[in-house]
Image (tube, rainbow, N blue to C red):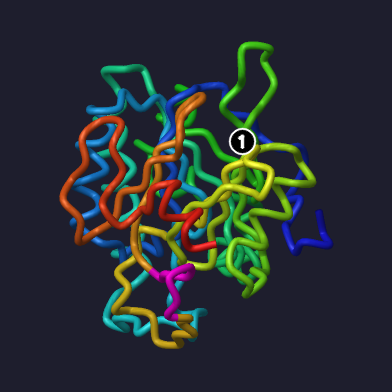
Amino acid sequence: MHELGVSAGQGLRRKIYETRVLVASDAHLPYFDPSLLSMMRSTIHECGIQCVLWLGDLFDCHKYNHLVLADQRLIWKQEKQVIVDLLMLINEDLEKAGGYQMVSRGYHDNLWLNRHPGTEDMRSLIRNLDPAIATLMQQGRISISDSATLEGIPNVRGEMTWVFTHPLHYVPTPFQTPRELAQREQKHCIAAHAHHFDVARNAEQTFWTVEAGGIFRDKFIKVDARNETAWRRKKSGFWVIMEDAQPLGFCSGCASSTMGTSCSCVRSMQDIQTAR
């Protein structure tokens, strides 16, 4: 695990037993893309989402982050309220179906934890946002993972078929980080952190590998090492992962998809094979 630069986190991996999961990574609140929030809320209902996974970097902590063109007028109290409002809004969307949110640790979440000894872990960081959030945690409506890597989407035998990760380091070669992790774990893999948005299949056609993108607003990224190829796209977006189905990608700038249909910028398997 450490050879891939993937953090094993603080303890055992959390498991997501639901089979309809929406993965939203790299929100970098308060710098998220509002158009994606609207699309996310529609998708939760259209796809019957049971779990929304915030796959790392829910926080931005711009005071410690030199990569973002931050709004220095924002104070921590205001940033915190943006996070609270978003979690409460998504909770409302999931409530009817009995769904819940999972928040896992990312690099920027670590920035806050490392600089504030009074905040012990992701659980205390999220719980201290607001009493209403603490209540949702007690009710099981918001779960926390201090590990950057989780497993989920069980098959009929109860075996987890996906690994979700927010690696500390991301290899520049397209798909290499999720592909190597998928091979090692023998599971499909979706990896956050790189802010790249795409999907592919391994050479043996056994595992999906996904670059998660993120729901940040791209204009805030100051240091931009884009590799403008057909393979490598830095784009805001989120994913729906369902049992025995191709991952569905949704991004800003594309028309909202209906259930079972990816947005137009996620290439079909035929396109991927042709590119190879």
Is residue 270 shown in magenta? no
The boundaries of the magenta stretch are 228-234
Please indicate whether residue 9 sits to the left or right of residue 170 in the image: right
The answer to whether residue 143 is seen in the rendering is yes
SS label for mark 1 = strand
Residue at figure coordinates x 21%, y 46% from the top left: 39
Q: Position of residue 61 (x, y in %)?
A: 46, 71
Kindly identify which residue carries mark 1. 162
Amino acid type at image mark 1: Trp
Depth order, front residue of 46/32 = 46
Residue at figure coordinates x 72%, y 58% from the top left: 6
Within-10-Å neighbours for mark 1: few <14, some 14–19, many 20+:
many
Q: Is residue 253 above or below residue 160?
A: below
Q: Is residue 126 above or below residue 59?
A: above
Q: Residue furthest top?
A: 156
Q: Position of residue 170 (x, y in %)?
A: 64, 69
